[in-house]
Amino acid sequence: MTTDRSEKTKIVILGGGFAGLEAAFTLKGLLGSSAGITLIDRSPYHYFIPSIHEIISGKVEAQQIRIPLRTMLAPAGIDFIQEEVLALDSGRHQVSTDNTALDYDYLVLGIGAENNFFNIPGAAERAYRFRSAENAERIRRELVRIMADESCDYTVMIAGGGTEGVEVAGEVADAVEKGCGRDALLSGRVTIELIEGQDRLLPGFPDRVRSFAGDHLMKRGVTLTTGSRIIEVRKDSVVLDGGAIRPVSLLIWTGGIQPPKLITTLSLPKDPFGWLKVNEHLQAFDDDRVYGVGDSISCYRGEEPLHIARLAYHAQDQARIAALNIANHLEGRGLVPYAPKNKPQLVSLGREMGLYIEGDEFHTGAWVVSLKKGIEKQHLLAYLTKPVSGALWSKVPGSELLNRLWLQRAV
Ligand SMILES: Cc1cc2nc3c(=O)[nH]c(=O)nc-3n(C[C@H](O)[C@H](O)[C@H](O)COP(=O)(O)OP(=O)(O)OC[C@H]3O[C@@H](n4cnc5c(N)ncnc54)[C@H](O)[C@@H]3O)c2cc1C
């Protein structure tokens, strides 16, 4: 396909999460008015997803960690369509929603991931999903409902002891302490049970991180069941692989993710788990006009997968590279390879305790929770002010070239 340069290049971005939003603003900074950029998301908001666990304890409300996409994008000259994308025809370079069919010259695909229930009977129907602010609000409502019972006798089960599972366990403990008192937890009247298939929490993290998280949650009254998997979810109970049946009032699913349905229906190559396969320039295999960014992708160098953790900062770095490569591709320049960078990971364990992990460096303390909060505020503010700062910056002669140079150094 050739792009008529007398017309604006049409760039469509799917998803207004960490990856899609960063791609939109970076492309705008690089291409200015030479491209028509449209972002599509089914949600009217961009959420700071790493804080959604705090909705469960009632520490924050969804509206405190979100910003409206249209309000942010319109002043920057980026079109926004609030619709669910139902189909992507990479052969015809077209995406469709219920109401619109949109042609593109370049597509940036950043639609995140979904909960994976691994075909466990009853799980998809009965467990509470935990991937979005809406999911967290629904969990909060149910938790408030069961806590309203004055007997304070119930079991909250969290399935999956990765970072999301331990963060949820900490928040549920905070909510229960506040609603029923610490004694209810320590005496065993209220049970918070965290189930993990491996022998300890936080698979993939260094041993001392895993031990600290487990010890801390147990001290707070959380029951840890490790080396066990749920094999069936019933109305008021779950069945474990050893045959034990555990009563459960509320089951929260933090036990794995899978690609969204839209990705699975694409005719482009996927990795063995169904994620969109992209090369080191973040282009889909077999289609150099489709760029994949964020949680939806599996990035390969040659035939080797890079095994990149699905994290917000990787999503943003990938978005910058994809944007730079679209600009480079358009202008006939060489493409830049994506190389993942390690940054600290912050994990909260509820009230006044967090884990800071960066390679071999490991720290704990309440300050980690404050740092996480600071990053949330800084993130939301940065995007809210981008239209104004971007518009002012674009008036500076040579700003597009400076953007490119800055990006090339930064990524
Ligand atoms: C509970 C939780 C805690 C986390 N904590 C951290 C953390 O502390 N640090 C960290 O670095 N990372 C963290 N992550 C991971 C981080 O949030 C993700 O890596 C990041 O959100 C990925 O960005 P993304 O843009 O790929 O996807 P998302 O941010 O999920 O955005 C995808 C967007 O696509 C939209 N969308 C999806 N399908 C469609 C469709 N068919 N049509 C239209 N729109 C669609 C969605 O509405 C959404 O806005 C956490 C994730 C979770 C779930």
Image (spheres, rainbow, N blue to C red):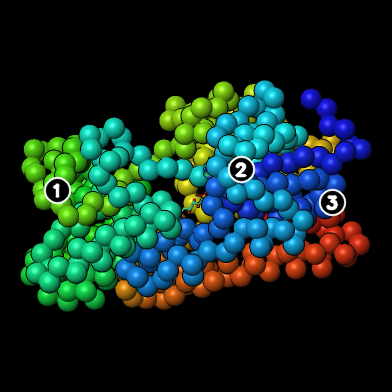
In the rendered structure, find residue 236 and report the number of the disc placed on it. Answer: 1
Side of 206 relative to 181 (left or right): right
Q: Identify the residue at horizontal 31%, vertical 45% (top origin).
A: 255
Gap in angstroms between the C-alphas marked 2 and 1: 38 Å
Side of 298 relative to 322 (left or right): left
The kind of secondary structure element at disc 2 is strand
| First along the sequence among labels 3 and 2 | 2
Residue 396 can be seen in this image: yes
Q: Which residue is mark 2?
A: 14
Q: How many marks?
A: 3
- Which residue occupies the foreground of this view, 86 or 226? 86
| First along the sequence among labels 2 and 1 | 2
Q: Is mark 3 within 8 Å of ligand 1?
A: no
Q: Identify the residue at horizontal 59%, vertical 61% (top origin).
A: 68
Q: Which residue is mark 3?
A: 33
Image coordinates for residue 45, horizontal then vertical, percent = 55, 58
Q: Identify the residue at horizontal 87%, vertical 32% (top origin).
A: 4
Gap in angstroms between the C-alphas marked 3 and 2: 20 Å
Q: Is residue 65 above or below residue 127?
A: below
Neighbour class for label 3 at 10 Å: few (<14), some, many (≥20)? few
Please name the amino acid that badge 1 sits on.
Asp
- Which residue occupies the foreground of this view, 363 or 81? 81
Q: Is mark 2 within 8 Å of ligand 1?
A: yes
Residue 169 can be seen in this image: no
Q: Quadrant for residue 360, please give it.
A: bottom left
Image coordinates for residue 376, horizontal then vertical, percent = 51, 68
Q: Identify the residue at horizontal 42%, vertical 69% (top origin).
A: 61
Please name the amino acid that badge 3 sits on.
Ser
Please name the amino acid that badge 2 sits on.
Leu
The kind of secondary structure element at disc 1 is loop
The kind of secondary structure element at disc 3 is helix
